[in-house]
Image (cartoon, coloured by chain):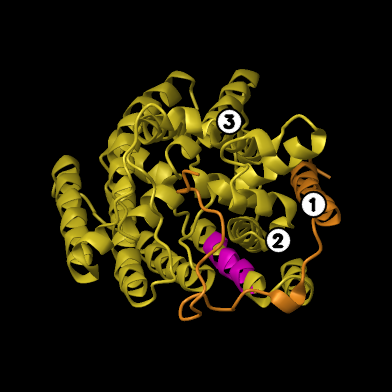
Chain colours: A yellow, B orange
Amino acid sequence: MALLAFFVLLVWFVALRQAVLFAVGIGMGAALAGARFGFTTGWRQLVEDRDPRGTVGQLLLLGLAATLSMPLLASYPELQAALGPPSVSLVLGAFVFGLAMQISDGCGSGTLYKAGLGVPLNMGILPLFALGSFLGSAHLDRWLALGEVAPVSIVQSWGAGAALAGTWVALIAIGVGVRLWAGWGRAWIARRWVWGAIALAVLAALNLAIAGQPWGVVYGFGLWAAKLAQASGSFDAAGNVFWSQAGNAQRLSQSLLLDVTSITNIGILGGALWIAARRGVASARPLTGRQWLIGLVAGFVLGYSSRLAFGCNIGAMLSGISTGSLHGWIWMPMAFAGTLIGVRVRRHFNF
Amino acid sequence: MTLRFLSITLFWIALAGFVAWDWSRSLPVDVLREPPLLAAGSGQAASGGHCSLAR
């Protein structure tokens, strides 16, 4: 009922587009929470249990999203891909993100939907994720000074058809590698991962068609913290390279309800809350004080590193790869390398 | 009321409070200049922020 009321308020006081994007966000949250579509868990199960089902579900999502998104980008030049620059900051940021997400047990979308489900650690992480995202964006120019090249669009370079074929070939090759690691006798797919992948791919393409840009999570968090920092007088946006850019400065001055990333983030929280209302709040193992501290620090690092990496599992990996950005293909192996360390750190602290 | 229910309630109150605070201090929304419902086919370039933005 509250979600419907907020939808009507958005239609009346903001814009119909924002209300529809809120509904898309609710769908994303419901799909993530309903299918328990956890990118972090999927990778951890692959590494620790040789269980490929989550990772195969993610590969399916990437392929389906690319199948829907790349033709859209080719047909409508006003739509934008998620093009981040290949850079030193991307390599470092993705590695650290992949490590931290195993400790905090949630990536960008995972933190959101688990917070919506009422998982205490993820609710606590959210403000620190926002602070980290803000500081990462505020420091981004210094990280970029370490070395960057211009963003590479595979769709523009190869054409949509070849880019889509190349994407599927690469995803299938990764899938074969995953199968070899897991062993051919293992179950390789599960129903919840399939329907989650289909729902999220459709919703991601809807986000692209409606908003004109791919699904993202992290920018919205950074914007929220930047607004608080600016209002407190502790941050001069005009003196910062990133936040003084025209578009970013405008979004700082206008309501966050007009920001497309913020509105889908709120929708995801709402969608997960809706699932929690139907199924009950998610169970969560009580944590020790030390685990809380480590988890919260990891949440801050998640936010900071995701800005250095030009997105999290959603903005960089899903949106990057499905819209043909080279940076998505750099993000994925670097984050997975970080995860290989992260699962060990997670075990060390008995999470 | 369990601690868990209380923490979830506080989380949503904080989020709603933040959105309301932001609304009160932001420039008013001009509803007559709202963006097209569908960006695809509108001819208008996307103007939102995204995580892939370097600048």
Q: Are marks 1 and 3 in contact (CB under 8 Å)?
A: no
Q: Are marks 2 and 1 in contact (CB under 8 Å)?
A: yes
The CA span between labels 2 and 1 is 9 Å
Q: Residue at x 42, y 42 (%)?
A: A40
Q: Which residues are magenta?
A: A20-29
Quadrant of the image occupied by residue A344: top left
Residue A266 image point, x, y percent: 65, 57
Amino acid type of the residue tagged 2 in the rendering: Leu
Mark earlier in primary sequence (2, 3): 2
The CA span between labels 1 and 3 is 22 Å
- Label placed on residue A257: 2
Q: Residue at x 50, y 34 (%)?
A: A140
* Of the pair A315 and A2, the residue shown nearer to us: A315
Quadrant of the image occupied by residue A138: top right
- Label placed on residue B22: 1
How crowded pointer 2 is (Cα within 10 Å; few <14, some 14-19, many 20+) is rated as many
- Find out whether residue A22 is within the magenta segment: yes
Q: Which residue is mark 3?
A: A300
* Vertical placement of residue A54 versus A275, above or below: above
Residue at mark 1: chain = B
* Mark toward the viewer: 2 or 3: 2
Residue A167 seen: yes
